[in-house]
Image (cartoon, rainbow, N blue to C red):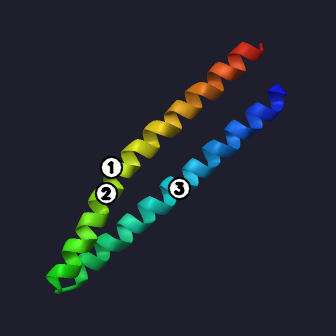
Amino acid sequence: MGKHNLENKRDTINKMKNDIENTERNYREDEKTIDQIDDEEVKADLQLKNFRREHSLKNMKSNIQNEYDKENNFKNNMK
């Protein structure tokens, strides 16, 4: 059972890393788009999306750190 839990934690961490990478990529792409367009309404929409992404990234990074801590705690308890 212990090995299964550790694998689940690793899967969770990998999914979270993927989510962070995708969000960061979307953020960068929208930043480029913001610089290239003149439509103020579209710019404002993209800026709002990126504002939300910034906060989501902070939370995702905090959550992944918590998962790492849980995994390390789990490994230490298995010794």
Residue, disc 3: 19
Q: Amino acid at mark 2?
A: Arg
In the displayed structure image, the side of residue 5 where residue 63 appears, left or right: left
Q: Amino acid at mark 1?
A: His
Query: Earlier along the polypeptide chain: callout 1 or callout 3?
Result: 3
In the displayed structure image, the side of residue 79 where residue 13 appears, left or right: left
The front one of 25 and 54 is: 54
Q: Identify whether 62 is placed above or below 42.
A: above
Q: State how far apart marks 1 and 2 are (Cα).
A: 5 Å
Element type where label 3 sits in the image: helix
The front one of 29 and 41 is: 41
Element type where label 1 sits in the image: helix
- Asked if labels 2 and 1 touch by Cβ distance under 8 angstroms, the answer is yes
| In this rendering, the label closer to the viewer, 2 or 3 | 2
Q: Amino acid at mark 3?
A: Asp
Residue, disc 2: 52
Label of residue 55 in the image:
1
Q: Position of residue 79 (x, y in %)?
A: 77, 13
Residue found at x 38% / y 51% = 56
Residue found at x 30% / y 79% = 33
Q: Identify whether 8 is placed above or below 35.
A: above
Residue found at x 35% / y 57% = 53
Query: Earlier along the polypeptide chain: callout 2 or callout 3?
Result: 3
Element type where label 2 sits in the image: helix
Residue found at x 49% / y 53% = 20
